[in-house]
Amino acid sequence: MKNFANKLAAVLAAAVMTVSAAGISVSADTETDTPKYTGWSSDEYGWQYLSEGVPCASDSRLINGVYYRFSLNGYCTGTCTGWSKTGKCYYQNGQPHTGWIGDDGSKQYCLDGYPVTGNFQIGDRLYSFDKNGIYTGKSTPAVLTASCGESISADAEKISITVKYNDGNDNISYTIGEPAKMERWENGKWKRCGKPSQYAVDDIAYELGGLGDCSVNSTDVAFYSHRYMGGDMPEGYYRVIVPVSYGETKKDLYAVFRAVPPVEVKMSEDIYIANNARNTTVGINIDINSKKDTLKAEKIIGDIKLEVQQKTESGWETCENFGYAAGYPDKENKLEISGEFFPGTGYTGYYRTLLTVGGKEYTAPFRIDNIWATPWLDSYSLKSNDITVSFTVRNKFDKSVKIGTDLINLYKKENNEWNYMQDTAGRFDCVEIDPSYITLEAGHKTTLSFDLSEYYDTSKLTEGDYAVLIDGAGFAEFKLTNDEPSAKEFPFKDLKSEDIKEIQLRYTNASMDVTTVIRGGNGRITNTVGEEDQYGITKATAVVKSDEQLKRVIDYLRQFKLGEPYRKNDTYCGGTTRIIVRYKNNTKKTLDFEYSKAVAYNGKSKYYCDEMLYFIADDMIEDTNKEYYASLGYNKKS
């Protein structure tokens, strides 16, 4: 953690610690001959898409292959799921949809957003659709099927098609010819593509029929797409037409596939939103779809050129501060690349990665935006042993994001400058672990809590303004004070079992130190018989999974009432009873009962407690797990 923090120290020295949406600055231009900005722009209210300086408003618009919706004020309300403005193309999450839509009465099957009509093969069945694309409810097993895989590289020179006979009737025989035609799906219609007059096909026929035992008989035919198209296929959906004859009857079979780029560049799922004023890690996946030997992943590593570009008023500009490292290709001919760049002050905006390999360019777009971290409790006492800060994090982006759930760095504001606290109060005995993340859906919020004492010596912190860095969100501020920690009259009044991770009941005296952990559930009691240490103290822990016992302890805590502050200087060294409530949001509350009729709440703040309350807690601990104490041979009351 220290090494990572030191790398960021120089970058963060001048950082603004509140989370805000900087956006792309778009200034009005009075010169009529100067082209106005076209592209994404953001401000504190959200995202807009400007067309020559004018926001797209109250409309849906196809931008860089993704369909977006916009409000009356011109702010993006998210990607479109549903029909386009023309009502002809169906989008799901902004992309043309392939698959079933609608219910039983209006069920349709879309191919690249457009409903199919007539008879259409899906899997091994033939489905019937009317002229409007509505499923008629009729489908039959397909006697003959043709398939070539769901996707094929656009630079494929040959497409192998498997034709299967699925009936098993040995009295029927089909003649399968070599395919000589291909069509492309454009705006909901199949259109002839390529140059069939220049395409030579071998006059080869294959006999295909039943085997008499209901097994599947099949044959393979070939279509040389590279010769037919005269080069690479444009991306999209195609069907190869396979001629079939049965006696005097002739018909066509169709093998449908999607042409994909020979090299695809995709942002990894970890790339959602960059942090405010810090280096941004970019994960890029490269899929090599081409079967050409020159484009195998292990051969292109040394040939790769990769950069990140930002869309500005003058066009795409390269982000100079960018570095990357290529990983190793896997057996599926995929390659992972990780990079890091610092976008600068105008970090929100529209970006793309540009990959150049084999003399061709491939791009993958992404956007950088803020989410919002706001204080949940903005003031915490330095006099508490348990300093856990909590924040509500809201996702104002239009898709899900990943948020770090670990404490990264702590800063303090001194003389109007934010100072890095690792060297001042950081603990170097903590174990570094891999960072953990949660997925936060669009428009949702969550609460994150960070225990400062886990990584910092809180006794070295002084009152003032502080901030923590939340990975994926930015900086969030809070205050540390010298005030006594606040405690309500009934501190556990609103305690709910669904909020509790576990409750620990601990009893300690001169000869034993026993902890009973209570969790909900119906599991068995896990007894671990303790062993004496060098001082003759038996230490042990038992885990009790019991809804009944958990409810009993919660009911007691709800009724517990704090008295007046306790100010006597007590030196009693007898047994103590401790209750620790651990919440699912990683916070905790503690009650330390002392024989001197005092109870410490959340650490150092002590309150009066009558003798009856002390012994109720004492008895409750023993009664929770009588079998465990008996196994140790102890009677706590004695």
Image: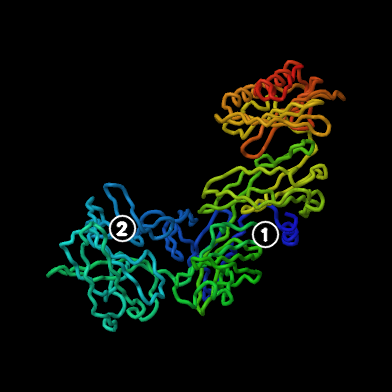
Q: Is residue 189 above or below residue 477?
A: below
Mark 1: which amino acid?
Answer: Ala
Residue 223: which quarter of the image? bottom left
Label 2 crowd bin: few (<14), some (14–19), many (20+), radius 10 Å: few
Q: CA distance from mark 2 to mark 1?
A: 50 Å
Residue 180 or 270: which is nearer the viewer?
180
Q: Is residue 293 left or right of residue 384?
A: left
At mark 1, the secondary structure is loop
Picture layout, residue 380 above or below residue 206 = above
- Dot 2 or dot 1, earlier in sequence: 2
Residue 503 seen in the figure: no
Contact (Cβ within 8 Å) of mark 2 with mark 1: no
Q: Identity of the amino acid at label 2?
A: Gly
Q: Quadrant of residue 60?
A: bottom left
User: Can you say which quadrant of the picture contains the N terminus?
Assistant: bottom right
Q: Residue at x 71, y 40 (%)?
A: 388
The location of residue 323, given as percent across then percent down, is 64, 69
At which x and y percent is residue 555?
62, 22
Residue beneath disc 1: 277
For this rendering, which residue is in front, 3 or 133? 3
**Can the viewer see residue 385?**
yes
Which residue is located at x 68 percent, y 44 percent? 450
Which residue position is annotated with label 2?
Answer: 123
The residue tagged with tag 2: helix, strand or loop?
loop
Q: Quadrant of residue 244?
A: bottom left
**In x, y percent, where is residue 309?**
58, 70
Q: Residue 97 placed where, x, y %?
A: 38, 58
Q: Residue at x 49, y 78 (%)?
A: 294
